[in-house]
Amino acid sequence: MSILIVDDSVDDRLLLQSILSAAGYEDILVADSAAAAFKCLGLDGGKQGAARVDLILMDILMPQMSGIEACRQIKAIDRFRDTPIIMVTVKTDPVDLQLAFAAGAMDYVAKPVNKIELLTRVRSVLRLVHEIDRRRAREQELLEVMRQLQEANQMLLRLSCLDGLTGITNRRQFDDFLDQEWRRALRDSTPLSLIMFDIDRFKNYNDTKGHTAGDECLKQVSAAISSAVNRPGDLVARYGGDEFVVLMPETSMEHARQLATKLRGWVSADPLLREKNITASFGI
């Protein structure tokens, strides 16, 4: 874990660094002022990337900007809101400490620094940081699991609305949509048209060519019809077997007749269906 020492005193910086290094902390950064600390943390507006810092040891008495004000400005940044700051200072007056804690400091160590006290507080704070990171990682894992579950539920919902063979809307979803649009048409006094069609002599074709060929025929018919019905409010569905429906809200009988004629032409013109002599009968 990375520790940033901020102190204008060279001797104090070296002392803190030597104590931490002897205790096994290898990733130690140093700064001789608040401005240097801001630069190290990437808060000076420069292009250089910010260093990863898990703990800041901050002196209170520094020139230009005090450690308390530096702490306040660091804590105002979202990404450093959870970064612990321990004040290292000769000022142990309750008022000064209260100001430091109000600025966001987590703890303090009095000067002259006691080695055991310093390491105890540092270890305690870093254990807390580790626990926070662990819980945050666990939360991210749970959020990812929830996202995957939501996607799976949405997929299941979509699949429950689709016909397994043709991939278009199934009978159950069509019935719900019809009920909804029927009520809306009654309420708003708007027309509601429906085209129902089936494949001519499909049973003979299925018996002669086999069920696999019959399934391919149904897929091709549904694809041809779906490509021709492109209004957002219209619905193409498999009604059952070789029967299909097109539901068209706010559509007059005349427009429905025109579309049915168009759809019959699409089925007749489709090269894959024409090759198999497939035709369809339409009713409005």
Image (tube, rainbow, N blue to C red):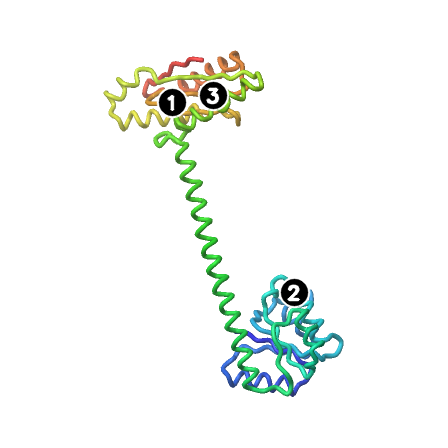
Q: Quadrant of residue 5?
A: bottom right
**In the rendered image of this protein, does residue 129 appear above or below residue 229?**
below
Name the element at disc 2. loop
The answer to which image quadrant residue 267 occupies is top left
Query: Pointer 3: what residue?
Result: 247
Whole-percent x and y of residue 266? 43, 20
**What is the spatial separation of the Cα atoms under label 3 and label 1, in whole angstroms?**
11 Å
C-alpha distance separating marks 1 and 2: 63 Å
Q: Which mark is nearer the camera, 2 or 3?
A: 3
Q: Quadrant of residue 64?
A: bottom right
Image coordinates for residue 50, horizontal then vertical, percent: 61, 67
Comes first in the chain, label 1 or label 2 = 2
How far apart are labels 2 and 3 at the CA level?
Answer: 59 Å
Q: Nearer the viewer, mark 1 or mark 2?
A: 1
Indicate the position of residue 270 as horizontal and vertical percent values.
40, 22
Q: Secondary structure at mark 1?
A: strand
Q: Disc 3 marks which amino acid?
A: Leu
- Residue 51 position within the rendered picture, expressed as x and y whole percent measured from the top left: 59, 70
- Whether tag 1 and tag 2 are in contact, CB under 8 A, the answer is no
- The one of 147 and 30 positioned closer to us in this rendering: 147
Q: Residue at 52% x, 79% y: name it.
A: 26
State the residue position of label 1.
239
228, 270: nearer the viewer: 228
Label 1 Cα neighbours within 10 Å, binned few <14 / some 14-19 / many ≥20? many
In the rendered image, the quadrant that contains the C terminus is top left
Q: Is residue 130 above or below residue 177?
A: below
Which numbered disc flags the more N-terminal residue, 3 or 1?
1
In the image, is 222 to the left or to the right of 232? left
Residue, disc 2: 47
Query: Is 6 placed left or right of 197 in the picture?
Result: right
Of residues 68 and 191, the one drawn nearer to the viewer in this rendering: 68
What residue do we see at 61% from left, 86% from top?
113
